[in-house]
Amino acid sequence: MADQPTPAPARPRDAAIGSGLGRVLLLVYGIFALSASARALVQITTHFSEAPLAYLLSAFAGLVYLAATVGLARGGARGRLIALGSCSIELLGVLIVGTLSIADAVAFPDDTVWSRYGSGYGYVPLVLPFIGLWWLWRNRPRP
Amino acid sequence: MNGPLSIAVIVLALALGVWYLVRTALDRAPSNADLWAMLGLGALVAVLVVVAVVGLFIGDRPSEWTTFVGYLITTIAFAPTAVYLARLEPTRWGTLILGVACLVLPVLVLRLQQIAEVTGG
């Protein structure tokens, strides 16, 4: 915990994807996993009939974030695969749902994390999959 | 929920957040002082949460009080979680973890205020 005036040594090639910047991503994905699934839980249990599609999407988004968090925390080949899959789904999700929520507002009367490209969450849901995929690509296994 | 305590938490969190971001940019691992500062913020947040919980029993309950309680639990757990993760990561990224946590905390407090304002009797 001491101060490190000298820059840290270069990141070892076989370092876990859940360390370094990956641990920051872990925290952010964890926050989104919690907020998206908690939001979905409240929406589904209290007023599901109002906008079932939006609420199911919230729940799905929560699961995707949860999978990404688990993948990063787990690391290794399988963890990487889980994280890669969920980051890709997340990117598609935020782009598709973001576009649809603007084009067809009637189908999305209530917000999800991905509505309007995540504007309700400071556009972090839009930026996050890019950072996640870049991080996984940067730490790809090399022979 | 709208008292000077919330404002103190928000201002302190933002100030600390900026400090941690600067330290991240300078490539510094979290120092002991950094970690203690975050715990201090966590203690202030804990006081805020206790005040809010007392308010649940003696005052008007927010109409979405389950959501409110969920936010309270998240809020009180936030700073300790950040410190735990930052201690696992004794690099500049540990400092960034503290910075991100400091920038999310004000959002949580603002959401708590929003939910508290809507009282459904």
Image: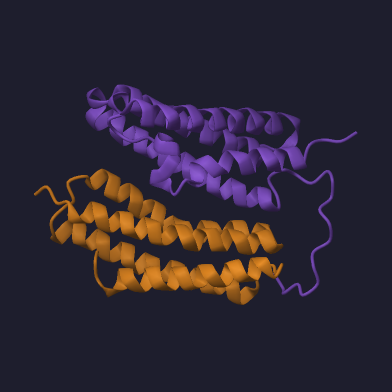
Chain colours: A purple, B orange
Q: Residue A130, percent across and down?
A: 61, 40
For the question of whether residue B66 can be seen, the reply is yes
Looking at this view, is A35 or A135 the one in front? A135
**Residue B79 appears in view:** no
- Residue A55 horizontal side relative to residue B23, left or right: left
Residue most extreme to the front: A103
Number of marks in picture: 0
What residue is shown at x 65% (from left), y 66% (from top)? B24
In screen coordinates, is B43 left or right of A52? right
In which image quadrant can residue B86 be found?
Answer: bottom right
Nearer to the camera, A41 or B55: A41
- Residue drawn at point x = 59 percent, y = 35 percent: A68
Q: Quadrant of residue A106?
A: top left
Report the residue at 56% width, 73% height from top.
B19
The N terminus of chain A lies in which quarter of the figure? bottom right
Q: Is residue A138 above or below residue A57?
A: below
Where in the figure is residue A44, as x and y percent of width and height? 30, 28
**Quadrant in the picture for residue A8:** bottom right
- Report x, y in % for residue B3: 24, 71
Q: Nearer the viewer, residue B84 or A21?
A: A21
- Which residue of the protein is positioned furthest toward the right in this rendering? A143
Q: Looking at the image, is A106 positioned above or below residue B93?
A: above
Looking at the image, residue A21 sits to the left or right of residue A89; the answer is right
Q: Residue furthest left?
A: B121
Residue at x 45% of width, y 66% of height: B42
Q: Quadrant of the C terminus of chain A?
A: top right
Q: Position of residue A67 (x, y in %)?
A: 56, 32
Query: Against A36, is B59 above or below?
Result: below
Residue situated in front as seen by the camera: B12 or A138 = A138
